[in-house]
C-alpha cells in the first residue's frame, strides 16, 4: 500500500466511512497518471470538512471510488481577507489567483477598472487554479473566485465594515509605511485592491481616497507589476494582520 505524494480536492461530503465516487478525469489522474491501485491512500479535502485520509476502494480507467478513513486535519479558514484585482494578461491573472490562494485570501474578486484591458475572465479556469493551489499548499479551504465585476459595483457591494487596502501606485514611497497604515486600521474584514497594468484612473483614485473604509498605501518606491503588487500586498497584510504569526 503506497502512500501517494498527492492531495486531491473532491466536491463531496467527507466523513468516516464515506464513499467518494471519482469522475473520469479524477480516475484517469489517480490511476492512469499517478498509478495508484486499490488499497493505496491519499489525503483528500472538499473545502468544508477538513482533510481526510482516504483509501482507494475501486480503481478503473474511467471511474473508481475512495473511502474516507480518518480526518487528518480540521478545516482551517483563512483570515477574512479578499483580493480584488484588475485582470491582466491570462497567464499573469492565473498567477495572481494561484498566489492569492496560497497566500490565504478567502475570496478572489476580479474587478474591471477604467484602464483594465481584458473585458472578461474565465471564472471556471480561475477557480480550477485556486483549487490546484489549495491542493498543493496543504490548505483545507478553497477561495471562491467571483465573476468579473465593475469596480464601482464592487465598491457599492462592499460592506462598510470591510477595510480596503488600496494599493495606490502614485503614492510609491511617499506615504506612511503600509505596515503602519494596516496596524493602525487594525484587524477585521479586509480587501486588498490592486489596479491594472495601466493603473487606476484619476476619477477612481479620487473616489477611493474619499472612501472612509479605504486606506491608500504605498508598496515602496518602485512601480510593481500588478501580479508582483498582489503578492507583495497580500504578504504585507498577512504579516501585519493575518494568520502568519499565530
Ligand atoms: N501604469 C501604472 C503606472 O505606471 O503608474 C502602474 C500600475 S501597476 C503596474 C498595477 C497596480 O499595482 C497599481 O494600480 C497598484 O494597485 C499596484 N502597485 C504597483 N506598484 C505600486 C506601488 N509602488 N505602491 C502601491 N501600489 C502599487
Image: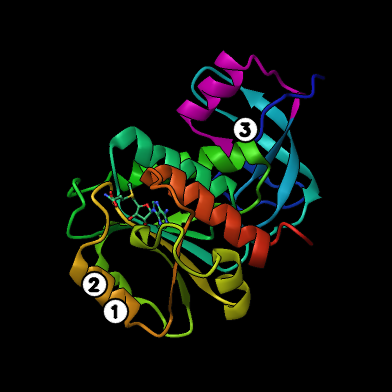
Determine which quarter of the picture holds residue 166: bottom left
Q: Which residues are magenta?
A: 21-41
Compare marks 3 and 2 and give the one earlier in the sequence: 3
Residue at x 79%, y 49% (from the top left corner): 71
Please provide percent x and percent y for residue 69.
79, 42
Secondary structure under the numbered disc 2 in the rendered image: helix
Which label was assigned to residue 17? none
Residue 242 seen by the camera: no
Q: Residue at x 31, y 70 (%)?
A: 154
Residue linked to disc 1: 156
Label 1 CA crowd tier, 10 Å (few <14, some 14–19, many 20+): few
**Residue 58 percent location from the top left of the image:** 65, 26
In the image, what residue occupies the spot 74% across and 45% down? Answer: 52
> Cα distance, mark 1 to mark 2?
6 Å
Q: Quadrant of the N terminus?
A: top right
| Residues packed near mark 3 inside 10 Å, few (<14), some (14 to 19) or many (20 plus) | some
Task: Verify CB contact (< 8 Å) between mark 3 and mark 1.
Answer: no
> Horizontally, is 148 left or right of 57 in the view?
left
Left or right? Give the position of 114 relative to 171: left
Rounded to the nearest angstrom, the CA distance separating label 3 from label 1 is: 45 Å
Q: Label for residue 65? A: 3
Does the magenta portion include 30?
yes
65 vs 134, nearest the viewer: 134
Q: Residues within 10 Å of mark 2 (few under 14, many from 20)?
A: some
Estimate the x, y position of residue 138 in percent, counting from the top left: 68, 42
Name which quarter of the figure residue 245 lies in.
Answer: bottom right
Amino acid at each position: 500500500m503506497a502512500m501517494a505524494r498527492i492531495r486531491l480536492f473532491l466536491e463531496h461530503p467527507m466523513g468516516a466511512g464515506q464513499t467518494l465516487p471519482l469522475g473520469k478525469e479524477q480516475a484517469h489522474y489517480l490511476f492512469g497518471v499517478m498509478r495508484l491501485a486499490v488499497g493505496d491512500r491519499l489525503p483528500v479535502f472538499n473545502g468544508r470538512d477538513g482533510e481526510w485520509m482516504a483509501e482507494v476502494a475501486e480503481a478503473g480507467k474511467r471511474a473508481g471510488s475512495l473511502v474516507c478513513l480518518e480526518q487528518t486535519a480540521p478545516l482551517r479558514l483563512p483570515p477574512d481577507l479578499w483580493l480584488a484585482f484588475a485582470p491582466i494578461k491570462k497567464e499573469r491573472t492565473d498567477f495572481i489567483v494561484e498566489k492569492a490562494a496560497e497566500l490565504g485570501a478567502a475570496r478572489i474578486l476580479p474587478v474591471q477598472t477604467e484602464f483594465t484591458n481584458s473585458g472578461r475572465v474565465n471564472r471556471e479556469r480561475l477557480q480550477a487554479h485556486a483549487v490546484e493551489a489549495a491542493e498543493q499548499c496543504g490548505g483545507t479551504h478553497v477561495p471562491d473566485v467571483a465573476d468579473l465585476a465593475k469596480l464601482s459595483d464592487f465598491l457599492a457591494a462592499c460592506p462598510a465594515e470591510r477595510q480596503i487596502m488600496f494599493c495606490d501606485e502614485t503614492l510609491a514611497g511617499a506615504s506612511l509605511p503600509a505596515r503602519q497604515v494596516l496596524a493602525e486600521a487594525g484587524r477585521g474584514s479586509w480587501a486588498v485592491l490592486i489596479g491594472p497594468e495601466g493603473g487606476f484612473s484619476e476619477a477612481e483614485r479620487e473616489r477611493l481616497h474619499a472612501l472612509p473604509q479605504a486606506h491608500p498605501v504605498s508598496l515602496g518606491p518602485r512601480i510593481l507589476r500588478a501580479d508582483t503588487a498582489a503578492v507583495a500586498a497580500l504578504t504585507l497584510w498577512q504579516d501585519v494582520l493575518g494568520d502568519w504569526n499565530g
